[in-house]
Image (spheres, grey):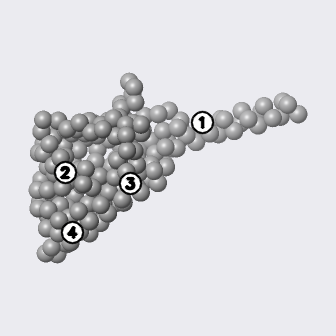
Amino acid sequence: MLRKIVIALLVLVAVFVGVGAALGSHFRVERRTSIKADVARVHELCGDLKNWGQWEPWRDDDPTIVVTLGEKTTGIGAHQRWTGDSGNGELTFTRCDPQAGITYDMVFIDGDNRSPSVALMNYRQLEPGTVEVQWVIEGELDLPVIGGYLALAFDSMVGPSFERGLAKLKSACEQG
């Protein structure tokens, strides 16, 4: 009987490892919202890291987060670092277009492990006075076996935070 239990456990572990290895480690999360404001107002809040505190959702999730802004807070090369109980990281703007949106390289840091990703916020004029904002993050989870499982769950882990952040951005833009 004990032998059957051990064999069953080994089969389960093999299946878990096999499926995890077969799953792709690529993740992508995307959310959108429409904002009744002009593109300049949206970019004022998204395109300058000094203004992210008005709408980004991460400090709601983890109030221990401390953000350190770089010398440059807007434009290509704008940079920030953060530390908190939920993790550490940094981001750097690689595109900052007042009409089209921003793109930034982001790295989550856990000890010596660095997990890079690319994120963007695109603006699209729907009609005069209404802008659609698309927020996307994508990357690879370089974690053997469990990376595939985490990539599979990434949308449900990050998506709600994106939704809260876009709701806060919408509110800040429309009330401002």
Q: Residues within 10 Å of mark 3 (few under 14, many from 20)?
A: some
Give the residue displayed 20% in from the left and 38% down from the top: 69
Q: Secondary structure at mark 2?
A: helix
Give the residue displayed 77% in from the left and 33% down from the top: 7
Q: Which mark is residue 17?
A: 1
Separation (CA) of disc 1 from disc 2: 44 Å
Q: Amino acid at mark 3?
A: Ser
Give the residue displayed 40% in from the left and 30% down from the top: 110
Q: Is residue 144 visible?
A: yes
Sooner in the amino-acid sequence: mark 4 or mark 3 = 3
In the rendered image, which residue does mark 4 sit on? 174
Q: Is residue 123 left or right of residue 6?
A: left
Residue 39 sits in quarter: bottom left
Give the residue displayed 53% in from the left and 35% down from the top: 145
In the rendered image, which residue does mark 2 sit on? 51
Q: Nearer the viewer, mark 2 or mark 3?
A: 2
